[in-house]
Image: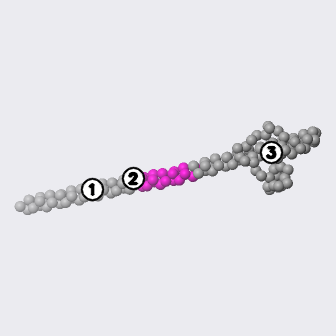
Amino acid sequence: MRRMEAEKNLQKVHRQKEKELMRKSLEMKLKQRDLRDNVHRMRRMDEYRKQLLLGKFNEKMKRADVIDEAKEDLLRRRREARMESTLQRQTIFDTFEKLKITKKWDNALDQFERGNFGTSSAPTSPHPPSTARSGSAGPRSARTGRY
């Protein structure tokens, strides 16, 4: 009888140890799963932040491209205006040189009033001509006042 009680106690202790081992094993598995889940969550958060930064970067690059295009367009228009002004100045100069030789002032005055400037080879611009200051013989720089 004592032996049976001792055996029952031994089995009871053995079952308790097994339960304790199973509990510890389960706790360890749950802890590992929590750690794994946290790692996945952190990776997803990092990926989300990365995508946000990439989106902002792309927006800024698009904006920079638009600004660059506008700058290039402005520079192109300035070059065209400078070329047109140079051609117009040269045409006026050539006309005055021709007038010095031919002395046909009445004909030249009519041409200047019409805007022909003595030749038909001057390029035409899609933009309307700018108005010069009254009494001006040609286009002047607004900043320096020189031709």
Q: Are marks 3 and 2 in contact (CB under 8 Å)?
A: no
- Please say if 121 is above or below 138: above
- Expressed as whole percent of the image width and height from the top left, the position of residue 35 reads 36, 56
Name the residue that disc number 1 marks: 26
* Three-letter amino acid code of the residue under disc 3: Arg
- Expressed as whole percent of the image width and height from the top left, the position of residue 14 reads 18, 57
54 in the magenta segment? yes
Give the residues in magenta.
42-61
Can I make out residue 89 in this image?
no
Q: Secondary structure at mark 3?
A: helix
- How many neighbours does mark 2 have within 10 angstroms: few (below 14), some (14-19), or many (20 or more)? few
Mark 3 and mark 2 lie on one chain; the one further toward the N terminus is 2
Q: Which mark is residue 57?
A: none
- How many neighbours does mark 1 have within 10 angstroms: few (below 14), some (14-19), or many (20 or more)? few
58 in the magenta segment? yes
Q: Which mark is residue 40?
A: 2
Mark 1 or 2: in front is: 2
- Please say if 12 is above or below 119: below
Cα–Cα gap, marks 3 and 2: 79 Å
